[in-house]
Amino acid sequence: MPLAADELAALADAALDAATGAGCQAAELRVERVRSQTLRLHDALPETTADATEFGMGVRVVAGGAVGFAASVDVRPEEAVALVRRAADMAAVTSRAGGGQVELAPEPAHGDVAWSSAFEIDPVDVPMADKIALLTAWSERLGSHHAVAHTSAALLAVSENTFLADLNGTRATQHRVRLQCQLEALALSDSGFETMRTVAPPVGRGWEWLTGGEAGDGGADGNWDWETELNDLPELLAEKLAAPSVEAGTYDLVVDPSNLWLTIHESIGHATELDRAMGYEAAYAGTSFATFDQLGSLQYGSPVMHVTGDRTVLHGLATVGIDSEGVEAQSFDLVRDGVLVGYQLDRSIASSMGFARSNGCAFADSPMHVPIQRMANVSLAHSGATGPTTDELIAGVERGIYIVGDKSWSIDMQRYNFQFTGQRFYRIVNGRLTGQLRDVAYQATTTDFWGAMEAVGGSSTWVLGGAFNCGKGQPGQVAPVSHGCPAVLVRGVNVLNAREESGR
Amino acid sequence: MIPAQEVVEGGVEAAAAAGADGCIVLVEETSHADVRFALNTTTTNGVQRGRSVSVVVFAESAVGTASRSGVVGPGGAAEMVAAALADARQSPPAEDAFPLVKPAQGPDRGRPFDEGPEETDATALEGVLSALSGAFGRARARDAVLAGFAEIDVATLYLGSSTGLRLSHSQPTSAVTLVGRTADGSGSAWVGVPSIDPSLEEMEQEIWRRLDWAARQFALEAGRYEVILPPSGVGDMMAMAAFDAIGGQDTEDGRTVFSKEGGGTRVGETISALPFTLYSDPDEAGVTCTPFVATSASSSEVSVFDNGLPFGRTDWLRDGKLEHLRYHRAGAAKSGVPMAPYIDNLILRCEEGKGGTVDDMVARTERGLLLTCLWYIRPVDPATLLLTGLTRDGVYVIEDGKVVGAANNFRFNESPVDLLARATEVGTPVRALGREFGEYLNRMIMPPLRIPDYNMSTVSQAS
């Protein structure tokens, strides 16, 4: 944070005194600095380098039962006072058109809070030259393989410093970092091309994730095995290029966590956002089939399905100490034994739907944006240390496909019908992998898919995946979020041939 | 806050003083107001004042960049220049290196550099807000719920360079969208207009007309249907082509639908039987946009070295033939083709075709589906530009020239390139707001299209 504690306190005092004076029922000031770096290489040469710092402050008030928000890049106490006035004006102006019923669910005051995510080296502090050097070496390594015609590499690094002060009495200073590194190789043949991308997930970790430590399984405490991934990718791509096109039809799927995290994100994560389920996103992100009247009764999936939301998992992208409304980070059940048992909440939706407290899912992606309900880390539980390995799941399939890595994704506005592709698809015949396939897309209705989940893998298969770029809200906001999951076995899923879908 | 022009001059001076071999300074002043509504009530809103400053500093042919929001005085720009120059001096030569643009290279485009920024504030929302309270009441009376969004963003750009460029451009970007749903969720309709001051009454009437259509419901199977794709949906499909498929380098690499098998590109090939022209033009009436290159970071198609380069119209398709792919100057020079910049609008026209509105095309339809808009459109297979997505907020069944009811939604798998190749009728192009990509590419002029065999891959239960 470029401001010292006394400067932040002066801003907070100015804003909160003004809010009290204006008779606001609630108010919070957020001062935030978000540093983001982007590096892209094409054929091992830098193509994009960008280093951006967003710095500003925003004030949200509840006044006369209506919400108002105002933000500015002019971070001074006088401007903080002006923002309270502008936000209160917005509350008044917009509520005249209809509104004025907002209450925020109560939250204990947390006093002075200092919180940081778990990392050793803030990735934005590493010189760009070092980043270019690492990605150049990795790109050259991929590009030196005879099967690889072109390579691309991308690195995104973010460091967020935030300060929140609310009328409730919470003043939270927080710092978190995140990192995403992906490399992709392209191979050409007479009949076209194929690509393959690394499946290493984005993480709430520091630079050490790319360079240091023992190679592990990518789980909560492991480092990613970049060595193996970079080593194997070209051969896997060459095999994919020569692979047969899939025959469309119904298959049993063994889905790797590197693919499944995105299916969880789209079909469970968004569907269990209560603001969506109630219709607050009807004009944009959409609503949800998991309507509130089905809480406690909707059979979301098979009895082996247990899903939690949390903002607490180590290295999670949505992990935080205090959320953007002053609510403490929590962990909570969304689906238990296959039944819908919870929703993700912010303070206003919690209050309006009769919950005693928000479960801490408010987030704003910028000091210029109002906090809205955003996704917690939504994760599927594994079946313990004695649960099946991926090989054991595959062994239970007569005719199926093992899917690794995410690629294309799409789901409808009530989160029923989805279609996903992947990076690698292996044909399973009589319990064994028998080589790769091309052109696979799987399509299902959410409750059918999760209802057909026969087995979830053990803890050895569990990986924390995720994304930097979850979109929601108007104006659009982008949120990072993690999803942990094991490998799973799903019976009888509709598989399309993407090439045939195009009519060719 | 010191004026934007002073930030530009401060940055240019700091770069010269620090020994940089050149620099670009971009300052964008923004103001913004928005209001959201749902469940017949206003929900969130916001007013913002922003400024972002970017410096691009050159050390021989290497580049360093820095961008910051927040108040930046001349001292702040100097700090950014120092950081960017340090990066540049450690970086390898840039692949897209090219001599910086000089003032003599084209006519001045845009507005005078010494003019102050244009601005907006909450008063821009007054028209929409005053119409909304009545609309909410009428919705309640109909047992319907309205949701939507109104937003205006005004951005004024200032660009200065070490070569003496001093350019400015200002443009508003706005949209109002309205969704109406029956209380039981069985019917849903959408109207979107790329303006902050549309006739909300007309939008509302269109919502009621469509919800009335939905009173009769048809359950249809997946399959290929004759479809009237309205301008919003055409715009979203064409936007994906413009985002994903017309990059010169990507196409030469062999990774787009316009790559030629065995190498090279399909420029010059006929893509569609109907003589479609897909183009971008900063001077196109109704969708004017920044008429010079302004970018703080390079990509495969856009280069920081080209900053300030004035441009006019570029045809991507002309009369059904692939005409241009997007290249920065360095890429174009390397490939021996014309430079074609990123331009922030997209227009599709066809000289042949009956023209007319969506309603006219419905009247000419014996049996088919009228779509409202498309949603969640994502690439599936870049080799064919196969996209998947969903129909949303209204699929209407047409029989004998009239809408007779609403059908369920579908997931589709289609390629925009194939849609142009298969279209049998083209309506009159109009200013359109893409439901999906309108927030990224607000300035589009698109016709409705008749597609005889649109691939509805599966049924979506969403309503």
Image: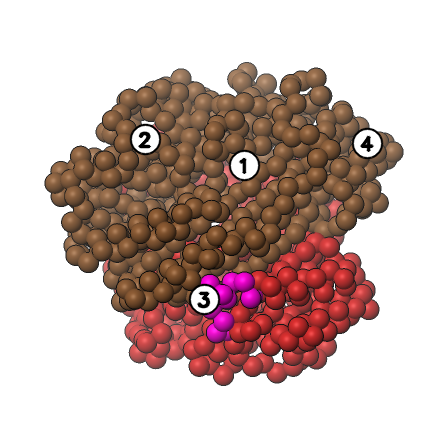
Q: Amino acid at mark 2?
A: Thr
Q: CA distance from mark 4 to mark 1?
A: 31 Å
Q: Which residue is mark 2?
A: B428
Of the two numbered discs 4 and 2 on the same chain, state the one appearing first in sequence: 4
Circle 4 or circle 3, nearest the eye:
3
Q: Which residues are magenta?
A: A91-102
Camera-nearest residue between B304 and A168: A168
> Is A14 colored magenta in this rendering?
no
Could you tell me how far apart the alpha carbons at marks 3 and 2 are, in whole angstroms?
37 Å
Q: Which residue is label 3 attached to?
A: A98
> How far across and how far down the image is residue B117, in percent?
67, 41
Q: Which chain is brown?
A: B
Crowding around mark 3 (Cα neighbors within 10 Å: few <14, some 14 to 19, many 20+) is many
Residue hosting label 4: B20
Task: Please state if A140 lies on the left or on the right of B142 as rendered.
Answer: right
Which residue is rendered at x = 32% and y = 76% of the image? Answer: A293
Q: What number is the disc on residue A151? A: 1
List the single residue furthest toward the right. B17
Tell me if label 4 and label 3 are in contact, CB under 8 Å. Answer: no
Q: In the image, which is nearer the foreground, mark 4 or mark 1?
A: 4
Q: Are marks 4 and 2 on the same chain?
A: yes
Residue B116 appears in the picture as rendered? yes
Q: Colour of chain A?
A: red
Camera-side mark, 3 or 2: 3
